[in-house]
Each structure stands twice: as C-alpha cells, then as structure tokens.
Image (cartoon, grey):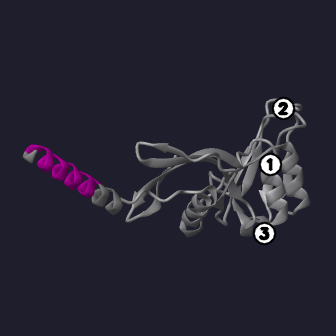
C-alpha cells in the first residue's frame, strides 16, 4: 500500500511538472502572407536603389528617338546599321555601359529581331513583392516563394515604355526565409 501511495504521488508530481512545463512553452506565432509581404517589402524599401540596365530593341530605338533621348547621326551603306547620339535630354537620364554618348546599332541583318543595345538609367530602381505563395515550414523556419518586380515608377514614362519591351527581365521568382527571433518572425534571406 505504501508503494501504491508513493507511486500515485509520483504520478501526480510528474503530471503537475509536465503541465507547468507545457504552460511555460509558447508556440511560435503564425506568419501570414500579408505579414510576410510587409516584411519583404520593408526590406526592399529600406535598401538603396539598384542600377537597372535596359535592353533596347528596334522598337525601343524608335521610342528613344521619339522621346528625344537619342538622334540618328550616321547611317551605314548596308542600310540597317546606324549611330545614335544621346541628346542633352538623354544624357540627363541615361548613360552607356561603355561610356561615351553614341549608341552603335549593329544588328546582324535588317530583320534581326533579337538585337539589342544597352542603356543605363541614372536613376536607380527599387523592387516590389507580389503574388506570395503558401508559407511552408522547414526545420523550424518559414519560407515563401513570390514574384519580385522591378519598380520603374521613378523613371520617365517613355523610358518605362522602352523597358517594357522584350529583352528586359522585370520579374523574377524569389524565395524568402524567415526565422523566429525574440518571439517574432524576421527575414533571414532572399534567394
């Protein structure tokens, strides 16, 4: 009987200890898509702007002439090569990766649809997060895939239109990883 009483006392003590332990443990808070998007966007908003190279195709060259960003200054005998000089308006907004002020337009043929030249806006761009997928739990961390878009809103409308042409990557799929720190989810990395 003595052993049965001790055993019951031991069981009660174990149950009370386990209950106290479990009451002291708090589960991790949920991480919603809205919260994840807010955390990711805050990272993008506080980061310095990024240089964004714009690939200019044949249509973009025409748009640049109409926007007065560059003018044709030389046409070659083959009829489809040309040199285009940046205008004063163009030099306020753009630079060329190789320096100088002349775009050397040299497609392989008159119908070469994939030829591009590159210009670099002087204004930097930021990124925006959109279309977050389902949040996954991996080894105690949370991950989410989403689309990262280049925010062209800081560029003039004609330059935004040129950047919308084929050859420019304006959206990339990314994955964000979050870790729990001091009871709150924080952004660990973006890949």
Viewer-closest of 78 and 151: 151
Q: Earlier in the sequence, mark 3 or mark 1?
A: 1
Give the residues in magenta: 3-18
Please, what secondary structure does the residue beneath circle 3 have?
helix
Q: Nearest to the eye among marks 3 and 1: give it.
A: 3
Q: Nearest to the eye among marks 2 and 3: give it.
A: 2
Label 3: few (<14), some or many (≥20) within 10 Å? few
Q: What residue did someone put label 1 on?
A: 83
Q: Is residue 157 visible?
A: yes
Residue 91, position in %: x, y?
Answer: 73, 66
Please, what secondary structure does the residue beneath circle 2 have?
loop
> Is 147 a magenta residue?
no
Q: Earlier in the sequence, mark 2 or mark 3?
A: 3
Mark 2–mark 3 Cα distance, whole angstroms, equals 29 Å
Q: Name, please, the residue furthest toward the front.
A: 1
Residue 129, position in %: x, y?
Answer: 65, 56
Label drawn at residue 88: 3
Q: Are marks 1 and 2 in contact (CB under 8 Å)?
A: no
28, above or below 108, in the image:
below
Label 1: few (<14), some or many (≥20) within 10 Å? some
Label drawn at residue 112: 2
Q: Nearest to the eye among marks 1 and 2: give it.
A: 2
128, above or below 118, in the image:
below
């Amino acid at each position: 009987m003595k052993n049965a009483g001790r055993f019951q006392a031991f069981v009660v003590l174990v149950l009370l200890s386990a209950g106290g332990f479990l009451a002291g443990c708090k589960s991790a808070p949920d991480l919603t898509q809205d919260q994840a998007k807010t955390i990711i966007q805050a990272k993008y908003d506080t980061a310095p702007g990024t240089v964004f190279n714009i690939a200019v195709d044949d249509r973009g060259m025409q748009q640049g002439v109409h926007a007065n960003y560059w003018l044709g200054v030389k046409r070659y005998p083959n009829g489809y090569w040309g040199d285009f000089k940046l205008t004063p308006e163009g030099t306020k907004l753009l630079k060329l990766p190789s320096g100088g002020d002349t775009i050397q337009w040299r497609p392989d043929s008159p119908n070469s649809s994939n030829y591009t030249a590159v210009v670099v806006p002087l204004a930097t761009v930021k990124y925006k997060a959109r279309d977050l997928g389902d949040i996954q739990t991996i080894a105690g961390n949370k991950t989410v895939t989403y689309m990262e878009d280049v925010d062209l809103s800081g560029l003039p409308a004609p330059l935004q239109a040129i950047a919308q042409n084929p050859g420019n990557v304006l959206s990339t799929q990314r994955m964000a990883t979050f870790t729990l720190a001091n009871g709150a989810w924080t952004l660990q990395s973006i890949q």
